[in-house]
Every structure is written in C-alpha cells, then in structure tokens.
Amino acid sequence: MRMDAPLEGKVVLVSGVGPALGRSIAVRSAAAGARVVVAARTASRLDAVVEEISSRGGRAVAVSADLTDDASVTNLAERAHAAFGRIDSVIHNGFVQPALGPVLDAEPDDIRQGMEINVLAALNLTKKLVPALVESQGSVVMINSMVIRNQLPNFGSYRVMKAGLLALARSLSVELGPLGVRVNSVAPGYIWADSVQRMFRRLAAQRDVDPKVIYEEIAADTDLRRLPEPDDIANTVVFLASDLARAVTGQCLDVNCGHTHH
C-alpha cells in the first residue's frame, strides 16, 4: 500500500452524493487511488462529480438510484459491482434531516419516513453488497452526525434517526467482522459548506449582523476555533476505508474540531 494512495486498487461506492460532503468523499477517494462509483437520485449532479474525477486523472462511474426503492437499490448494487468487478468499500452518505422542533411534537409518519432513508436504506444496500464485501475483505463507513453526542434542542427526531444508524453500524460490525468486513462510522460537526453557510446567513439576517459573527460564536465552542470542512470529513472516511484502519471496526470517529468530546 502506497502511503500517498491508501486506496490504490480499491473500488469505493459512495451513496447519497451531493454537492458538498458526498462530492468531497468521492473526489478524495479517487485522489487516494480508488476507482469510484457515485450514486444518488440527481443524474446531473453525479455526472458533474464523475467529470471532476476524470479531469483529475481518476476513474468513476455514476449510477442513478433511489435508496428507498428496493429494485433501484438492487440495480445499484449490481451495476456498481459490474462497473469495476469488485467492491471494497461502501460509504453511506444518503440522509434527510427532518424539520427542527421538539421530538414530542414530531409527526410519527415524518420519523418513519426519515428512518427509511437515514437507517433502513443503509441496511438494505449493505445487505445486497455483503457477498462482494466479503470477497474483497472490505469495509463499510456510515456518515453519522454530532447530534448523537450533543444536547442541542430541536434536533430530537434527527438524533433518534442517527442513533439508530450508529446502532446499525455497531451491529453490522459484530455480524460482519467474523467474515472479514469492517464497519465504522464518522460523526461530523457543523460542516462548513452550503447548507450550514445558508443557515448562518439566515441567523445573521435575523440579528442584523455579519455572518462572520455567527461563525465565530459557534466556532468559539470548538477546541480548534473553526468548523470542519467537507474534505476534513472525507479524509477521515478515506482512512477508515483504507488498510491503514485494518484493525479498526465498530467505532465512531468524531470529526468536529473538538465541538464535542467522546
């Protein structure tokens, strides 16, 4: 294994690829030497990521998929394996964040729908990839959230979903470990990208202050006095997917610049 290319020779499937973290995971995986399969519902977004990877000398293919539809997930698993003849790692980045508010006020159907994409979709895709992952002695990485660590109000429904995802990852580690497959989680803090930046601008407008004020106030609660960027999380994912982490399984690695400790 080359230290400058820890994923060389491996094939990585990234689900839920969007313009921020999902894109970064795919691009950083390719930079680390992997051939990459990117999956999401929006084909144009996938094509842009494939083009970016290709322009940098990497290899990637796109598969449009609805992670809540079993037939679509089956198609994704089959096409992902067929693309490069193997799957070494699957990175579950698909998620939906429910409306903020007290969990006691949440509609049960909203929580059920959130669990469908935030937890059950990851389970279903992993199940379909088990034969390929066992063959490659591969790994699974679940993208979680620091809501499982903190006490912020109004994130109750999301916390329930992400706690379920954490339990799923730990359970899969127990079951797949004897077969040689590692399963880990990454829990980012506020990721300094589009959605958080929009939220900060909205909060700043409400208080009639510069968005930098909001950033500095929130960053002040971190040990590093800054917020993690997409590549910070992606670099951790690459580590967990690589043989550098060959003895790491059943763990959740927090990447939040010291916003919470675990």
Image (cartoon, rainbow, N blue to C red):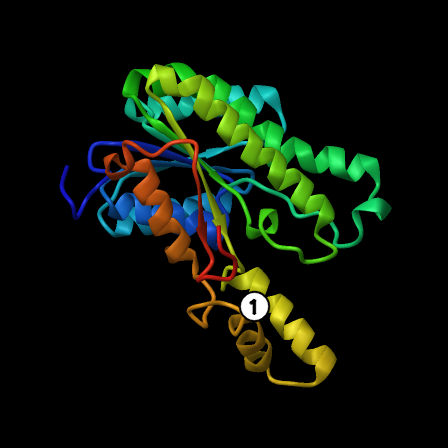
Residue 58 position within the rendered picture, expressed as x and y whole percent measured from the top left:
25, 44
State the quadrant of the N terminus: top left
Given residues 232 and 193, the one toward you in this image is 232
Given residues 125 and 54, the one toward you in this image is 125
- For badge 1, the amino acid type reads Gln
Q: In this view, does 44 lie to the left or right of 151?
A: left
> Which residue shows up at 78% across the image and 39% down it?
110
Residue 177, above or below 16: above
Residue underneath mark 1: 197
Q: Locate residue 157: give its quadrant.
A: top right
Q: Locate residue 238: give its quadrant.
A: top left
Residue 74 position within the rendered picture, expressed as x and y whole percent measured from the top left:
51, 19
> Which residue shows up at 49% across the image and 64% down it?
192
Q: Locate residue 197: give its quadrant.
A: bottom right
Residue 260 position within the rendered picture, expressed as x and y whole percent measured from the top left:
52, 58
Is residue 132 at all visible to an observer of this figure? Answer: no
Q: Is residue 119 left or right of residue 39?
A: right
Residue most toward the left? 2
Q: Is residue 12 left or right of residue 166?
A: left
Is residue 210 at all visible to an observer of this figure? Answer: yes
Residue 64, above or below 149: above
Give the SS element for disc 1: helix
Number of on-image labels: 1
Residue 21 position within the rendered picture, expressed as x and y whole percent measured from the top left:
46, 51
Residue 42, above or below 164: below
Mark 1 closeness class: few <14, some 14–19, many ≥20 residues within 10 Å: some
